[in-house]
Amino acid sequence: IPVEVLLLTIGESSHPDSPTHTPSALARVRAQEFRAALAALHPAVGHRFLALPDGASGDHAEAIEEAIAHAVSLGGDRPIVVAPWRGDGHHDHRIAGEAAARVAGRSGAALAEYPVWLWHWAEPSDDGVPWSSAVRVGLGDAARDAKGRAIDAYPSQTEPLSPAPGDEAIVDDRHLRHFRRTDELFFLTPPDGSAADTAAEASRSRDSFEEFYARRPGGWDFASWYETRKRDVLMAALPRARFGRTLELGCATGVLTARLAERSDHVLGVAIAEAP
């Protein structure tokens, strides 16, 4: 089966407070790690790197969809699209999964979605998870060995970049226990099926965010240098000193909303989850 791996982002923003690695330097490291990991899995596998900004895949959904569609066209008579699960609770995972679902729905390809963050927030009784479509794929010794070597090819994620604060490993032992399992789990949409409807997708996305905020009431680290600078850049880019009405979509805990309120007569912030 011909395989084409699409790498959308390279994770250059994983260590925003690193004193030793700039995002561009980390991107070069990750590119080398990606090639080494792919070689560990299978040296003949094709790949394409879209070089999208880390965390900003939502701005490039059309390009992602086009890349997936092109890869599917190379997949023979029975293509399978394997993508992150749309309900995983991670922005880039959702964007990639939704694009994959749209391509699979149009092309008739089978869709297999793999969860990542789900293992840290879901329960077996969680009705927001499509357990009825889940399939388990056992891994033989050779596959487990190859997967282990691929994981180990990413020391910039599994090990600290340096002893300095801000250079901590981002994939710890708790994460690695899931990745080193003896089987893989996928949510499968067969080739003659259709992607879940919009309402069901929205419900799963809302539930995943509710779960996230239940664990972390403050949301993401909005006080970090990266998030603070992002808000400052956005505010500086606004073309006028003051606005009459401002709509913020995806306002989360309202940190940016407060900044917008300083320059607006009226502000409406909208979020998919009620928790914030």
Image (cartoon, rainbow, N blue to C red):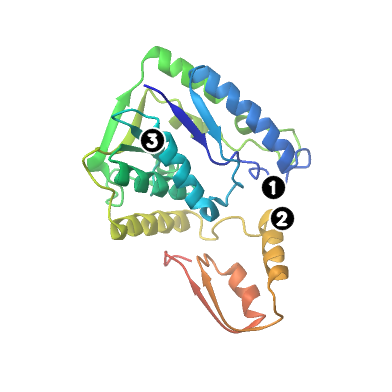
Q: Residue at x 55, y 23 (%)?
A: 37
Task: Using the numbered discs, state the Cα–Cα distance from disc 2 to disc 3 in whole angstroms.
Answer: 40 Å
Judge whether 265 appears above or below 186 on screen: below
Amino acid found under the numbered disc labelled 2: Trp
Amino acid found under the numbered disc labelled 1: Pro
Q: Residue at x 33, y 59 (%)?
A: 203
Mark linked to residue 225:
2
Q: Which residue is mark 3?
A: 72
The crowding category of the residue bearing disc 2, from other C-alpha atoms within 10 Å (few below 14, some 14 to 19, many at least 20), is few
Judge whether 118 appears above or below 213 on screen: above
The kind of secondary structure element at disc 1 is loop
The crowding category of the residue bearing disc 1, from other C-alpha atoms within 10 Å (few below 14, some 14 to 19, many at least 20), is some
Residue situated in front as seen by the camera: 33 or 152: 33
Q: Say whether marks 1 and 3 touch (CB < 8 Å).
A: no
Task: Using the numbered discs, state the Cα–Cα distance from disc 2 to disc 1 in whole angstroms.
Answer: 7 Å
The crowding category of the residue bearing disc 3, from other C-alpha atoms within 10 Å (few below 14, some 14 to 19, many at least 20), is many
Q: Say whether marks 2 and 1 touch (CB < 8 Å).
A: yes
Q: Residue at x 60, y 30 (%)?
A: 158
Amino acid found under the numbered disc labelled 3: Val
Mark linked to residue 77:
none
Q: Which residue is mark 1?
A: 16
Q: Earlier in the sequence, mark 2 or mark 1?
A: 1
